[in-house]
Amino acid sequence: MFDPKTNRFPYPSHTDGHYLDVRKDRGIVFDENYPYIDTSRGFRFVDFWVRVLLYAVVMPATYLRLGLKVEGRENLKKHKEVIDKGVISVSNHVHLWDYLAINCAIKPRKPRVLVWQPNINGENGTMMRHVGGIPIPETGHKATKAYLKAVHELLDGGGWLQIYAEGSMWEYYAPIRPFKHGAAYIACENHKPILPMAFSYRKPSWIRRHVFRQIACFTLRIGEPVYPDETLRKRAGQIDLTERCHAEVCRLAGIDPKDNLYAPVFRDSERIDYYTTEYGVG
């Protein structure tokens, strides 16, 4: 496995921390009345044209920009019957464009993705919504209940939900960070499997390194569904599913789970500097 070992990015002290600034607050209130999945005619009209743009321009650009290779597509065919009944996917979050890479890998399926609330309120929030973004509300129990109801309806209708279980994006980071339990919670509550995927890196060509200053090329590997253990009690089942999915993402990224730097479950986990004492300073 190629490890970029970059210190270009200021990785935060906690493994779920964000380091990109959101420069705008549009003042949207994410409460129980917010349409977490907007089915209005106007929204769907714009969605259609955004999808056309994705296929015609953005997806080809994604392959070129990331040097993207996709492996494991046969698992989508092998488990088509299960996936078409509703599925959750998890992966490491390592690039601004990695959700676009997932769109490339699973097309013509149209995934939705859980997004940090400030990002939807930020300057790119409208486009995030139209490529499938669902904000995770931070405004109380009623809002959370409404958002989970929308997610349930999506999965019950055979939809695809992508969750970045690490909790935030760290560009070009190689170890798989601890997973939060949200993906497992949603999977267990809705009796749906989790499809693990993982981004790993390849050393870029001389032209990519020296002309385009590219740190690494990306490979996305698609695994096989991981199912909740229905015999376990609620909390134990979520932890068990989180641990098994984390192990699968490690393997797909080319890392033996026993050798991964972090424990599988997030417990206020702090960053471990493994390159140099200056690693992550930016």
Image: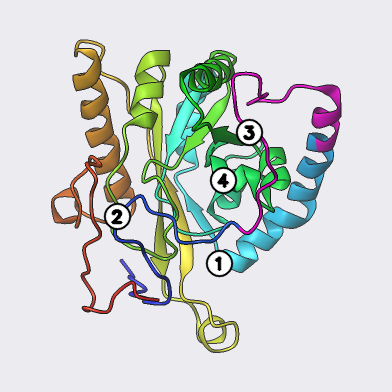
The answer to whether any part of residue 55 appears in the image is yes
Q: Nearer the viewer, mark 1 or mark 4?
A: 4
Is there a contact, CB below 8 Å, between mark 1 and mark 4?
Answer: no
Quadrant housing the C terminus? bottom left
The residue that mark 4 highlights is 118
The answer to whether any part of residue 191 appears in the image is no
Mark 4 closeness class: few <14, some 14–19, many ≥20 residues within 10 Å: many
The residue that mark 1 highlights is 67
User: Was residue 119 drawn as part of the magenta stretch in this picture?
Assistant: no
Three-letter amino acid code at disc 3? Arg
Mark 2 closeness class: few <14, some 14–19, many ≥20 residues within 10 Å: some
Three-letter amino acid code at disc 2? His
Where does residue 217 sit, x and y in percent of width and height?
Answer: 48, 68
Q: Please tell me whether residue 80 is drawn above or below residue 110 in the rendered image.
A: above
The residue that mark 2 highlights is 14
Where does residue 115 sit, x and y in percent of width and height?
Answer: 54, 40
Q: Nearer the viewer, mark 4 or mark 3?
A: 4
Where does residue 114 sit, x and y in percent of width and height?
Answer: 52, 36
Q: Residue at x 22, y 43 (%)?
A: 264
Quadrant housing the N terminus? bottom left
Q: Residue at x 41, y 33 (%)?
A: 195
Q: Which contiguous range is marked in magenta? A: 23-46
Compared across the picture, whether 168 is left or right of 280 comes to right
Q: CA distance from mark 1 to mark 2?
A: 29 Å
